[in-house]
Image (tube, rainbow, N blue to C red):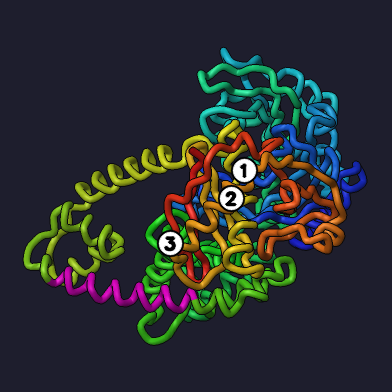
Amino acid sequence: MIRMKSKELKEAYMKFFEKYNHKVIDSSSLIPENDPSVLFTTAGMHPLVPFLKGEPHPLGKRVVNVQKCIRTGDIDEVGDSTHFTFFEMLGNWSFGDYFKEDAIKMSFEFLTKVLKIPIKRLAISCFAGDDDSPKDEFSAVQWMKLGIPKERIAFLPKKNNWWGPVGEAGICGPDTEMFVWNGPGESPKEFDPDNDFWVEIWNDVFMEYEKTIDGKYLPAKNKNVDTGMGLERVLMILQKKDNVFEIDTILPLINHIKKIAKINDANDEQIFSLRVICDHMRAATFILGDERAVTPSNIDQGYILRRFIRRSLRHLKQLGVNIDKEIITTKIAEKVIEVFGEDYPLLVKKKNKILTELENEEIKFKRTLEKGLRQFEKIADKDIDAVKAFLMFQSFGFPIEMVEELAKEKGIKVDIEGFNKKFEEHQEISRKGAEQKFKGGLSDHNENTTKLHTATHLLNQALREVLGEDIRQKGSNITSERLRFDFNFDRKLTPEEIKAVEEKVNTVIQKKLVVTREKMKLADALKSGAQSEFETKYPPEVWVYSIGDFSKEICNGPHVENTETLGKFKIKKEQSSAAGVRRIKAVLE
């Protein structure tokens, strides 16, 4: 195996796939555009859905990148040896070009020839098959042809070896996953997927099905390849570590937090806290330093961000750090920016904004703690039941451990079992609520979403003409029912301005303007006056969509062919989204 640092691995991956005619694309925002199905970008394929659905990519049928990702489902796993909430994902894609055989050959070559991982340390899983799709014998045969022994290949069910769709319908398919032995001694002859020393590092997804709204799996029009390799996990293998928190980009953060907490030799409990703080503060810094940055709040991405920051503060307190004495989170964020700033220069550019938001949130949390302590004094005259313990958690952000600690000081008991039951009920309700709120989504490019997407172009230009030419898009989100559009503006719109924007959009719709698409070099597109989203990175060649002579934007689609199909545009709500950012929600009637 070749010992590589983070930057070297990224460069090796890009160089390898460039050799096979893949074009390098930049990492997209952590906040998905026009995607109500997820809060954050959880994989490199999210920004590429239009192309996986059949829209042509301006750079061709093969692309490669490293994508910043966040998976909130792993919050409770953070602290073990392999899980992060924020991570970087290496990925290569084929949009209807190569398929299973070539994808597997390339994956194998990169692992064994470039990284020089011995075949004897590799294991593979493939889809076991079910009523919807047959067993993926073809992939298994390809791996065996390359030298993977039959006993090192496991066939697993849908929950292990199938991707998608995200939402109720859309593109999906079986996958084949690659594992590396990271345990003591020689790897076992037979692959046991339940043995944690087999670490999953790469996943090749073969999108060959389209799931219909009534649950049928039909052959997809385009057969695509979508892969994802966990950067940090591969570095753990290459750098011969037994956990991801000791790799070259993460250990400096851990050591920095240890220094703040004045810890030399950490015990197991302290190690857990150090890892949680490291992960959560890295995630919070990247969210605040994103192209579509959000701020801490009680809803959606802002709620997760707040949870990251406050959970970090609680663990700092558990490590004995006096969070009342000074602002601590900014010191950790500065280290994150120092370590990752070269690869993600936007972090450096937005440093002041990141630090200001962290300081504000830390001050708010300390006030909440004070209120919570006063509330605790009111209920601590006798043993604390589950209802009161849960109130302390839900309303004041007090973890059960903190309630237990305070209760112990007063010699009273806490109903931990009852609290855990209430907490599980709360998680179940939250999960169901999220599923209901964000159903549909990624693959749901239907007629309504296509119309609403086109309408955002008209809205963007109408805002510029009514409010001023410095208006720029700051983000958007579209469901089948409505569009949501964020833009830079420092005050509430007047009723007259809202009416003027509406009328302008509807006037354009009635003109029955043709929507056209043209491939242009990025510099030429910007020079021609094409609008772009604020701070978003674009490839060297882009699609430019023009709606008559009214609107011109860099975009990936999908769009209608003529504005006459849009119907009547109606603004339903105008509100603040963040400091200096307004949000419009609108529908087509």
Q: Which of the 4 quarters of the picture holds residue 526?
A: bottom right
The kind of secondary structure element at disc 2 is: helix
Local crowd at mark 2 within 10 Å, few (<14), some, or many (≥20)?
many
Q: Earlier in the sequence, mark 3 or mark 1?
A: 3
Asked whether the residues under the numbered discs 3 and 1 touch, taking CB atoms below 8 Å apart as contact, a structural biologist would say no
Marks 1/2: CA–CA distance: 6 Å
Marks 2/3: CA–CA distance: 16 Å
Rendered location of residue 388, percent (x, y): 16, 57
Range shown magenta: 357-377
Q: Earlier in the sequence, mark 2 or mark 3?
A: 3
The residue carrying mark 3 is: 495
- Badge number at residue 509: 1
Q: Residue at x 30, y 63 (%)?
A: 397
Q: Which of the 4 quarters of the picture holds residue 7?
A: bottom right
Amino acid tagged 2: Val
Marks 3/1: CA–CA distance: 21 Å
Q: Is residue 396 visible?
A: yes
Position of residue 100 relative to residue 229, above or below, is above
| Magenta-colored segment: predominant secondary structure | helix
- Badge number at residue 505: 2
The kind of secondary structure element at disc 1 is: helix
Say which of 418 and 537 sits in front.
Answer: 537
